[in-house]
Amino acid sequence: MAAAAGAEPRGVAPIVEEVARAQRGARRRFSAVFAAVWIGLIVLIGGGMWIASGADLEFVLVSGPVIVLQGAGITILVSALSIVFATILAVLGALGRLSGNPLINGIASFYVSLIRGTPLLLQIYFIFFALPQLGIVLPAIPAGIVALSMNYGAYMTEIFRAGIQAVAAGQREAAEALGMPERLVMQRIVLPQAVRIVVPAIGNEFIAMIKDSALVSTITVHETLFMAQRIGRSAFEPIAALLIAGAVYWTLTIIFSFFQERLERRLSRGDR
Amino acid sequence: MTQTDVPDRGQRPATATSGYERDSTLPPHIGEPIVAVEGLHKYFGDHHVLRGVDLEVRQREAVMVIGRSGSGKTTLLRCINFLEEPTIGAIEVDGVRVDADPLHARDRRHREQIRQIRLRAGMLFQEFNLFPHMSVLGNCIEAPMRVTRLTRDEAATRAEGYLDKVGLSDKRDEYPSRLSGGQKQRVAIARALCMEPKVLLFDEPTSALDPELIGEVLGVMEDLAHEGTTMIVVTHEMHFAEEAADRVVFMEDGVIVEQGPPEQLLRDPRHEETIHFLRRFIDR
């Protein structure tokens, strides 16, 4: 017999509760297996590598903290400063690539093409080894930051350009119709919305940057990989040192991903 | 397309632009001319969308523009504040006269003139176009603060007045994403009013709304019209036009076919095209 419309049919409460309990159980089982897989794989691969490297515990306990503390510090410093400068370059680059002025547009397009068309490692070498021939001598860390900023600035130029173009045309029209001059329209209406659109992509660039910053070890920047190689070599524990460096990069990216996710959630709040 | 489409600027009798037989037939609340569209032509590429439009709107007058989609009514409205650059013709709003100049559309002087027109003509869009990254109040005070150079307090006081007028003062701190379509359009109206323009341009302001939300927006617009706000409204809402318009303009194929007071134009149209167009609505 059908129950009256709107009323709760008899005997349904236990079923509803049972379904909810089953769903909770399934979620818990999923989390448990998921965590077990991660822990198992870490133990398996980490342990295997440990044994294969023949590392001795004393090395890890004594030299590990040096690699982590000094190396990771420089890695974070270089990556963070580079992402800031790269972002500034990228905004300017994107405005240039969208500019109606052929001079500005030409410069911006040339920059993107040249930098994206050559290897990052070559750019790092060029800035550190070749620029001094022209009388421009940069210490290792600034040279590394310049190279990474220029390189990522070029890639992020394209991200920002797409972000600016993704802001609805109506937004610009509404601002113009209020009598806002072009500069204000860009500054107050278009760019803030473009930034929201590109945050996920910029986050990915930052994660890539953390790892690519290892390339500046080649120009004697004392970052994670550099420290690992130096200490590993002198202690005859090269593989263990590399494993520690790998763990540092991985941990940094996991931590950053966590913050990135929260930032994205916060930024999406005001959106439609 | 024939050469006869080229505008004969200034050759037309007054009735062609103002829609009134003589000044003596003007309703008493209507004032001096404040918007003038003269000999307006607009091409999109080869496509001749506006084919010589003359229109004069007077202070405190509510003019509703009706016509089929593709008749050029939205393009006409967008040409008035130069969201579209007209190909030929001139626009005058509150004493600021700007000639169409498509070859120099990017010139600084031309842009500044256009901006002077835009400061005098507020625009409402079908899609509202509220700024999603700003609160309701933020939307309303942005231009007054940064363009008119009011202080934050002055702008906020003004904004609260207009938000109250559209019945949304309790939403001042909400973000647009939390508003219904009708509320969004009312905020957009408040935002436009905050610049205290001489004329409001409405581009199908209720076309993107769910049917049950149309009334609240039309209600606000009707109040504005009765208070003597000068407005030009492109709309498909015939009942609204009949209630709130001082004058209805019927466009087809990029020209104004016929215009007049709503009771005459909507009840007793003279032109074949107007009769044909209105039949669809009367049948309903």
Image (tube, rainbow, N blue to C red):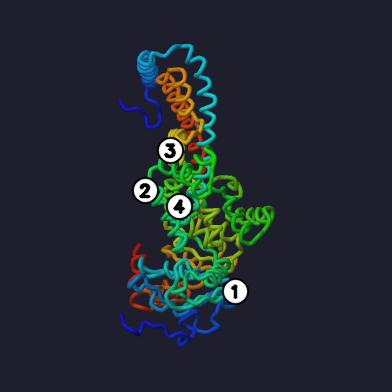
Label 2 close to label 3 by CB (< 8 Å): no
Disc number lying in front (1 or 4): 4
The residue under label 2 is A117
Most distant residue in the bottom direction: B11
Taking depth in this image into account, of B152 and A260 the one nearest to the observer is A260
- Work out whether mark 2 precedes mark 4 in sequence or the reverse, and give the earlier one: 2
The residue under label 1 is B29
Amino acid at pointer 4: Ile
Q: Give the total of numbered labels.
A: 4
Q: Pointer 3: residues within 10 angstroms few (<14), some, or many (20+)?
A: some
Question: Measured from the top left, where is residue A101 in percent x and y?
Answer: 46, 63
The residue under label 4 is A164
Amino acid at pointer 2: Gly
Mark 4 and mark 3 on one chain: yes
Report how far apart the C-alphas of labels 4 and 3 lie in the structure.
Answer: 18 Å
The residue under label 3 is A204
Report how far apart the C-alphas of labels 1 and 3 lie in the structure.
Answer: 62 Å
Residue B270 in sight from this viewpoint: yes
Amino acid at pointer 3: Asn
Residue B215 circle label: none
**Which residue is located at x 50 percent, y 61 percent?**
B124
